Amino acid sequence: MNDVFGLTGRVAAITGGGGLLGMKHAEAVASRGGIPVLIDIAPAAAKASDLAGRFQVPAFACQADITDPASVRCILEEILRRFDRLDILINNAANNPKMENSAEVNFSRLENFPLQQWNADLSVGLTGAYLCSQVMGSYMAEQFRRSGRRGVILNIASDLAVIGPDQRIYRQPGLPGHLQPAKPVTYSVVKSGLVGLTRYLATYWADSGVRVNAISPGGVFNGQPEDFVARLTNLIPMGRMANGDEYQGAIVFLVSDASAYMTGHNLVIDGGRTAW
């Protein structure tokens, strides 16, 4: 019986590959024999080397700006130069804004959210995913026409692509309402946009051997403050945040032949939060 979860020799480009979840996705691919390519604006060569040593696969890193079409084309050229194939694209990159608030203004709030920050967040999280899909997805579609080798695109969305953020969990005691922090508007817009992009690409390339799905994970515990964790877990039927490695099985499923008849779907894995 064939191993439908096997990824031996398949090349996976992972944007934001040097980050917390990007590395988890890369580990998932490498654990099944796939070759992760860590694409990141920051250097990630040491992380790729670590993956190569632990999993015995030729992982490598590309430092690149996915908001620049020329940079994305260079990524593809480098992947093809090394491996002469590309099988998987995981659109994982997201902007991580660091906004300096003042005593009078909290810039995370919708009323004050800067247009410059809006443009920056959408540029990385949504336009970057579009550009990578345009360039790499088009190549995978052509690869299928030439050789019959199929491709996969996986967009990393969020449970907040399915529901609105509960702003109560971000509140801090003692602050007046106009200074209370909020989940930025761009997070919901980018993640919802990725689900829309998923459906569009899935139907666009349905006859071209390229499957496109999304995964909407819930929050991952990463040392957040106890009071925030308590408020969030109160909204989750399973009563806890996710561990960093709990999405790896779903990643393998979605990028392997185990999901061969699945496209255009958004797989929600959130501890039951959206069931309430």
Image: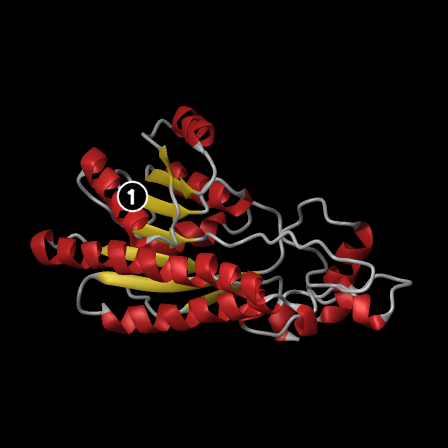
Residue 260 can be seen in this image: no
Q: Picture coordinates of residue 172 (x, y %)?
A: 84, 61
Farthest-out residue, top = 53
- Report the side of 210 relative to 56 (left or right): left
How many labels were placed on the picture?
Answer: 1
- Report the side of 78 relative to 188 (left or right): left
Q: How is the image coloured?
A: secondary structure
- Please name whichever residue, 4 or 185, is drawn nearer the observer in this view of the structure: 185
Look at the picture and state if 59 lies above or below 7: above
Look at the picture and state if 227 lies above or below 81: below
Q: Which residue is mark 1?
A: 75
- Please name whichever residue, 168 or 74, is drawn nearer the observer in this view of the structure: 74
Look at the picture and state if 72 lies above or below 109: above
Q: Residues within 10 Å of mark 1 (few under 14, many from 20)?
A: many
Q: Residue at x 52, y 60 (%)?
A: 121
Disc 1 secondary structure class: helix
- Report the side of 246 relative to 3 (left or right): right
- Report the side of 68 relative to 190 (left or right): left
Quarter of the image for residue 155 reads bottom left
